[in-house]
Image (cartoon, rainbow, N blue to C red):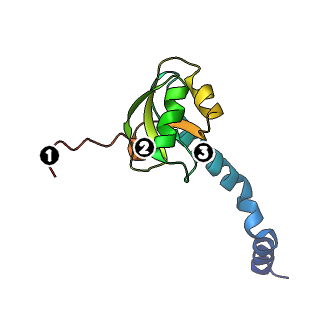
Amino acid sequence: MTIPDLATEQRTAGGGLALLPALAVAVLALGGGAVAGYAPPPEGEMAVVFAPWVTEGQALRAVIDAGGRYVGPSRFGNIVIAYGLDTGFEARVRDGGAWLTVAADGLCSPQPRRTEAI
């Protein structure tokens, strides 16, 4: 067996498994960055995410029942922008049916209100 044959044999024997640790580190780094970037504040303005079948009216009721204030709609019907008055708002709104809360920016930013006549 020549040296080039040995190198080819070693590369094919390991396959993609040699890249597995690097892939795991990349996934953890990207996931950690996404979580940190979209973490909601303990109190204040945040996007509250509900199940896709929850209407905006039901989401509004859950926010108000949890002691929050409705700020406005988002780009998605099941995500509303709310203002949590205290640090317990997140837990209460999750108990009321919300899946999670995220920072109210990017895709979950408030939609501007139309003021022109239609």
Compared with 41, 7 (above or below) is below
Q: Earlier in the sequence, mark 2 or mark 3?
A: 3
Q: Decide if residue 29 is on the left or right side of residue 82.
A: right
**Nearer the observer, 54 or 29:** 54
Q: Amino acid at mark 3?
A: Gly
Which residue is situated farthest in the top direction here? 86
Question: Which circle's residue, 1 or 3, is located before the other in the chain?
Answer: 3
Q: Please, what secondary structure does the residue beneath circle 1 have?
A: loop
Residue with the mark numbered 1: 116
User: Mark 2 or mark 1, which is nearer the start of the sequence?
Assistant: 2
> Which quadrant would the N terminus be assigned to in this image?
bottom right
Q: How many marks?
A: 3
| Residue drawn at 56 percent across, 18 percent down | 87
- Looking at the image, is mark 1 or mark 3 nearer the viewer? 1
Q: What's the amino acid at mark 1?
A: Glu
Label placed on residue 101: none
Q: CA distance from mark 1 to mark 3?
A: 41 Å
Distance Cα–Cα, label 2 vs label 3: 18 Å
Is 8 left or right of 68, judged from the image as shown?
right
- Say which residue label 3 marks: 31
In which image quadrant can residue 31 be found?
A: top right
Question: Hey, what amino acid is under mark 2?
Answer: Cys
Q: Which mark is residue 108?
A: 2
